[in-house]
Image: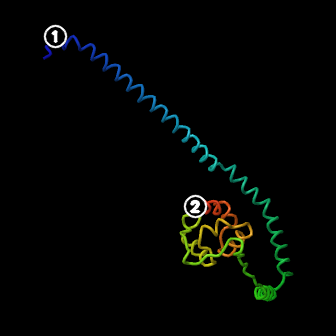
Amino acid sequence: MMNQTDFLNQLPEFAGIFILMFSTFLIGYFSSWWLHKSKNRKTINRLKQEINTLKSPKQLHDIDTIFTEIKPKIIEVMKENREEMKTATPPEKIIEKARTSYVTYTKSTPELNFDNFGHATFEEKQDLTQINGIGPYIEQKLNEIGIYTYEQISRLQEEDIRTITELIDFFPGRIERDNWVGQAKSLKVY
């Protein structure tokens, strides 16, 4: 057990350690307070400056001046637009033209050349969702047009990819970016 004289002999050592730790704490505390204050001070000064510029009557006066200079030009442009609108085609003729162009518009659907990449049946169907970029919806669309296997996808050529993109309403260039052909080649090995 420690007697009183030993404790008194060690007291100056404890006091020195305490003073050292306390001074370190104070230095850290005040330096962080000062850094925090200076950081906030910059933000506060910037916001004060923005508020003062918004309050200044000079800027409001400039806006009024600009508006009075622009107003005659705006009126002039509006008059010109009114004149153009009066001489424009009547709405009935526009409607008639739109109807005839809509009725005569026909789009032929492209056809796939299965000789390029082969035929497959539903019984041969593979899980196409293993290819990155093909989800369940796209897999269903591919199945609807007759594409069921990795072998078929691995043999696709550029013209086939364009046709498939149009048939399944897919993003142009997405099949190439996702590298379906390369992924299918690696998957058909397994």
Q: Considering depth in this image, is 56 or 181 the residue closer to the camera?
A: 181
Q: Considering depth in this image, is 46 or 97 the residue closer to the camera?
A: 97
Q: Which residue is mark 1?
A: 5
Q: Considering depth in this image, is 173 or 17 the residue closer to the camera?
A: 173
Q: Is the N terminus in the top left, top right, bottom left or bottom right quadrant?
A: top left
For residue 184, which quarter of the picture?
Answer: bottom right
Left or right: 84 as drawn, with respect to 189: right
For residue 122, which quarter of the picture?
Answer: bottom right
Residue 3, image x, y percentages: 13, 13
| SS category of the residue bearing label 1 | helix
Residue 33, image x, y percentages: 45, 33
- Residue flagged by tag 1: what amino acid is it? Thr
Q: How many neighbours does mark 2 have within 10 angstroms: few (below 14), some (14-19), or many (20 or more)? A: few
Q: Earlier in the sequence, mark 2 or mark 1?
A: 1
Residue 165, image x, y percentages: 68, 71
Residue at 80% from the left image edge and 69% from the top image edge? 75
| SS category of the residue bearing label 2 | helix
Q: Considering depth in this image, is 123 or 34 the residue closer to the camera?
A: 123
Q: Which residue is mark 2?
A: 189
- Residue flagged by tag 2: what amino acid is it? Val
Residue at 20% from the left image edge and 12% from the top image edge? 8
Viewer-side label of 2, 1: 2
Left or right: 97 as drawn, with respect to 141: right
Residue 133, image x, y percentages: 59, 64
Q: Is residue 115 above or below residue 90?
A: above
Q: How many neighbours does mark 1 have within 10 angstroms: few (below 14), some (14-19), or many (20 or more)? A: few
For residue 187, which quarter of the picture?
Answer: bottom right
- Distance, label 2 to label 1, CA atoms, is 86 Å
Q: Is residue 91 above or below residue 44?
A: below
Q: Is residue 169 above or below residue 130?
A: below
Left or right: 171 as drawn, with respect to 8: right
